[in-house]
Amino acid sequence: MEIYAYAASGFQGALISVEVDIRRGIPAFDIVGLPDGAVRESRERVRVALRRCGYTLPAQHILVNLAPGSLRKEGTGYDLAIALGLLVASGQLEQNEETGALLCIGELLLDGRVLPVPGVLPAAAAALELGVEKFLVPQGNLEEAQSLPRGRASGLHHLQDLPQLFTEPWPEPSVLQFPSRSGMAGEVVDLAEMRGQPILRRMLEIAAAGGHHLLLFGPPGSGKTMACRSLPGLLPPLMAPQSLQATRIWSQAGKLAPEEGLLYRPPFREPHHSASAEGMVGGGASLQPGEVSLAHEGVLFLDEVPEFAPRVLQALREPLGSQRVSLSRAGRSTVYPARFQMVLAMNACPCGNLGKADGSCTCMPHDIRRYWRRLGGALLDRVDLRMPLHPEPAPVLLQGPGECSERIAERVLQCQRMQRERQGNRLNVQLTPQDLNQVATLGEEARFYLGKAVDKLALSSRAVHSCLRVARTIADLDDRPDLVTDDLLEALEYRRFGDKDLSWFVL
Ligand SMILES: [Zn+2]
């Protein structure tokens, strides 16, 4: 039996061959092959766990080699592979001739229980690439390990169950299935709870349908945070390839709950404004993914966005542009996917009262400008849809419930299907300028208005492309193949707030 473990190096990683050699000599138990502290401590956990489960540790010279020796081995996931190797090498476990190569991952408690570990899905994917199709994983990681189509995964609760497990045939590959668990944080707000705000509802639907980045601003009580938190409820479930990649990142980060398989819902991440740049884009000694990658194929929501450190907001530019993040540290480097929908919320001014009907804002215009500048022009330029919110008056708040999220989500799903079919499995937010020439051509009248808007609002070419993508989504929601002037005018309307033009102050 060949036993393999897995060494992660950011989003990439490598299979590690675990070899155990037992020979006569002064009793010793050594692990070689660049083990870090946690891997060296594995000796003690394995030693005690084996004894407590009734196995014996041969009083001979035991050498565990983790190869290739050039890769650094970190964490506690090697325990199970080392214990299994020892049992096989010492003849305490009947070798099943058919087992062949086996990926084996898990941490041991001293009483022999097997604890779930991060990174099982990436490990399984790496194993399959090398033709290793059998996995032995902690029971808590079983669903995760079963989520790959060809893998044959077996879950282990306790070290005592090992002999029994090897007498049974190895499980056949399971069908790719989505459990009902979700990658969402906290409660998802249903739009039925929102009163009034027809334009906001429309904008949320457009944002969800085309994957467009969104900024909502207004005084407390205007419903901006609630609106942002409703967005995940409008998005369709992940498709299999998206889900695999997102789940792999979550697994790497140790964020999958025990017994959670593939992520079913798009992730929704809401980091606190005290987040560090490392927390936001990833990093650290073991090149862990950051919020932008945890939000891959989902939503990254930054509430009170001017409160974030400028350095942290700056760091968003790379992933927003390239949909991935490159990390490097101490000679190691990795690239994580980071294609997320950015959703921002903020007050309109430092005191927060701008936009209230009572005119209680006391901020000076230059304070307001400075407050907005904290976002940085480059970040703001990436936001396709912007909207000032005002609290709805009391009579509106007493109205009955609005259309529920589920109904809107059906239209969004329909619209996304159409986009993916037309343009190679991409949403409108991903359309390149070349694509736009094909799928978002304007008539003469629309071109005239666009020219005027470019002059009046000083739109960058990035802004023009952004408007065309939004206009495309508006037409798609209406199931129209061609753009009409109104599609463009509506898109421009959502673009004009918060750019160089600050005239919305007087609105
Ligand atoms: Zn103010």
Image: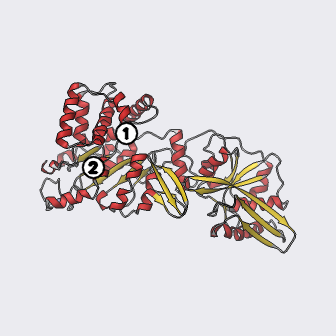
Q: Is residue 403 left or right of residue 453?
A: right
Measured in 3D between alpha carbons, the distance from the residue under mark 2 to the one under mark 1, in whole angstroms, is: 18 Å
The disc label shown at residue 429, or none: 1
481 or 333, which lies in front?
333
In the picture, the disc for residue 187 is: none
Q: At numbered mark 2, what does the secondary structure look like: helix, strand or loop?
A: strand
> Which sits earlier in the primary sequence, circle 2 or circle 1?
2
Tell me: is circle 2 under 8 Å from ligand 1: no
Name the amino acid, label 1. Answer: Val
Q: Quadrant of ligand 1?
A: bottom left
423 is higher (above) or lower (below) than 284: above
Name of the residue lying farthest toward the right: 24
Residue 266's place in the image compared with 138, above or below, is above
Residue 132 location, x and y as percent?
70, 46
Q: Is residue 200 left or right of residue 105?
A: left
Residue 391, compared with residue 482, is above or below; it is: below
Q: Which residue lies at the image location 50% right of the left edge and 38% below the top edge?
A: 239
Q: Looking at the picture, how far across and down is residue 365, in whole percent?
A: 14, 58
Eyeballing the image, is 9 above or below 423? below
Q: Which residue is mark 2?
A: 216
Residue at the spot x=49%, y=60% of the render? 283
Task: Kindly indicate the quadrant of the structure image that contains residue 374.
Answer: bottom left
Residue in the picture at 77% in, 70% down: 29
The residue nearer to you, when weighing 488 against 72, is 72
- Tell me where residue 276 appears, x and y as whole percent: 40, 63
The percent coordinates of residue 461 (x first, y second) are 28, 40
Name the amino acid, label 2: Leu
